[in-house]
Image (spheres, rainbow, N blue to C red):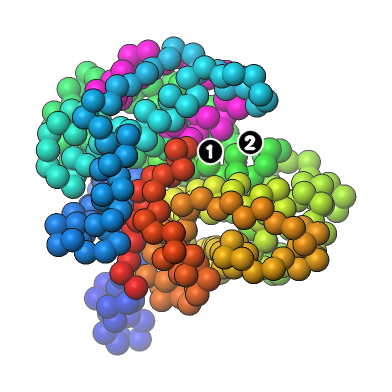
């Protein structure tokens, strides 16, 4: 890690210093809190809200007025969460995702306001699930587990490292829940499914690994990031065809074209699911940014490995989300513009820390602020990650 001077002995600029990963305390494997949101970001968000600065003040009002912030919020835990991949009714799927987001929301509110009632509510929700849930079943089990686990880990990380009222026995039970019920389902990924599955499963693995101080699982998620992100977002440097997902049998031009929803022309920033819809590509932008941001807080610069690829993907999808006409080579000239609240974290690093020019993403993000929650695994990222510019 560089010190106070840059290469060649010249004094480092403020921008260069800001563009370095955070340092971990000596002898400590992980920095805490460090699942997506670091201590400095929590402090900055709180100060912005206290001074009624935008867009943070509006983002805070949006969060505090949501159903997840209610002091009367009650968890609805299930022993078995059943999530079919078809039209059959599930059991506990929506409840689990919403309860996990509610726990994270209450944890953020505790950090914004200092009101212990929010901390107690966050812990109450997490305890309710750790006392009951045993497994996930049906075809969407992997995706459901990943969506919920990302929010559980963010909530638990904040409560562990900013609150002193979570009884040790209950927290240990929650940790066992993540290790036994969630981590085994997502740690191996899902190579042959659409890439948003694989990426959010890696996001969940990394998030839980930091909270649980589980370095082997963290390293597994890092490997997953390094192999899956290039196989999901295309760059011309990959060659004529996209990178094959590691562990899959998608290894011929015909299989690749089918896997990429019939797309046969590949240009910088295109994703494996662009021609399915922008919603799923957007999930993957969020998961990629989440992993890079969490790794950043741990002193590992994954952003640096994918910055051009991530920037191209953000700009590509933002351009068409904003209404640009899709050319005939792109999805037959028809795209489904349904991106979610998924651009804030990546933009904060690429434009905020690295000073990269992302005009389309900047415009889209400003128009969408405050970016709220998708009710799946993304929540309140304008509040935690927005930059003023």
Say which of 331 and 249 sits in front.
331
Say which of 228 and 233 sits in front.
233
Say which of 383 and 313 sits in front.
383
Measured as percent of width and height from the top left, residue 224 is found at: 56, 46
> Regarding mark 1 in the picture, which secondary structure is present there?
helix
Q: Is residue 339 above or below residue 124?
A: below
The label shown at residue 201 is 1
Measured as percent of width and height from the top left, residue 21 is found at: 35, 62
* Range of residues picked out in magenta: 123-149
> Where is the N terminus found, in terms of image quarters?
bottom left
Q: Earlier in the sequence, mark 1 or mark 2?
A: 2
Where on the picture, by quarter, is residue 123? top left
Where on the picture, by quarter, is residue 301? bottom left
- Give the Cα distance between marks 1 and 2: 8 Å
The residue located at (38%, 21%) in the rendering is 177
Q: Are marks 1 and 2 in contact (CB under 8 Å)?
A: yes
The residue located at (32%, 39%) in the rendering is 66
Q: Residues within 10 Å of mark 1 (few under 14, many from 20)?
A: many
- How many labels were placed on the picture? 2
Q: Is residue 357 above or below residue 147?
A: below
Q: Report if residue 145 lies within the magenta region.
A: yes
Overall secondary structure of the magenta section: helix
Q: Report if residue 141 lies within the magenta region.
A: yes
Measured as percent of width and height from the top left, residue 159 is found at: 23, 35
The label shown at residue 190 is 2
The residue located at (26%, 84%) in the rendering is 11
Where on the picture, by quarter, is residue 180? top left
């Amino acid at each position: 890690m560089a010190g106070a001077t840059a290469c060649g002995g010249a004094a480092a600029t403020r921008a260069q210093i800001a563009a370095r990963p955070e340092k971990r305390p000596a002898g400590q494997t992980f920095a805490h809190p460090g699942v997506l949101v670091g201590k400095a970001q929590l402090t900055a968000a709180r100060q912005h809200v206290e001074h009624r600065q935008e867009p943070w003040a509006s983002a805070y009002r949006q969060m505090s007025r949501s159903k997840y912030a209610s002091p009367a919020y009650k968890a609805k835990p299930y022993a078995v969460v059943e999530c079919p991949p078809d039209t059959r009714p599930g059991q506990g799927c929506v409840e689990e995702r919403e309860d996990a987001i509610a726990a994270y929301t209450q944890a953020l509110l505790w950090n914004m306001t200092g009101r212990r009632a929010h901390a107690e509510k966050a812990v109450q929700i997490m305890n309710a699930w750790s006392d009951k849930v045993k497994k996930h079943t049906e075809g969407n089990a992997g995706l459901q587990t990943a969506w919920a686990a990302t929010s559980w880990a963010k909530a638990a990380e904040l409560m562990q490292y900013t609150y002193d009222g979570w009884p040790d026995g209950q927290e240990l039970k929650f940790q066992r829940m993540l290790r036994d019920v969630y981590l085994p389902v997502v740690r191996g990924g899902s190579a042959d499914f659409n890439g948003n599955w694989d990426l959010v499963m890696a996001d969940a693995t990394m998030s839980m690994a930091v909270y649980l101080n589980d370095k082997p699982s963290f390293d597994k998620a890092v490997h997953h990031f390094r192999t899956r992100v290039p196989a999901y977002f295309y760059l011309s440097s990959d060659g004529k065809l996209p990178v094959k997902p590691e562990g899959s049998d998608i290894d011929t031009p015909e299989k690749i074209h089918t896997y990429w929803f019939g797309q046969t022309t590949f240009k910088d920033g295109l994703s494996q699911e662009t021609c399915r819809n922008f919603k799923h590509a957007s999930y993957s932008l969020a998961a990629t940014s989440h992993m890079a941001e969490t790794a950043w807080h741990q002193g590992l610069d994954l952003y640096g490995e994918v910055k051009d690829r991530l920037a191209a993907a953000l700009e590509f999808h933002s351009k068409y989300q904003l209404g640009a006409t899709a050319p005939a080579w792109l999805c037959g000239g028809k795209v489904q513009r349904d991106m979610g609240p998924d651009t804030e974290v990546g933009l904060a690093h690429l434009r905020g820390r690295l000073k990269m020019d992302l005009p389309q993403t900047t415009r889209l993000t400003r128009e969408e602020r405050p970016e709220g929650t998708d009710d799946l695994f993304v929540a309140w990222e304008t509040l935690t990650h927005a930059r003023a510019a």
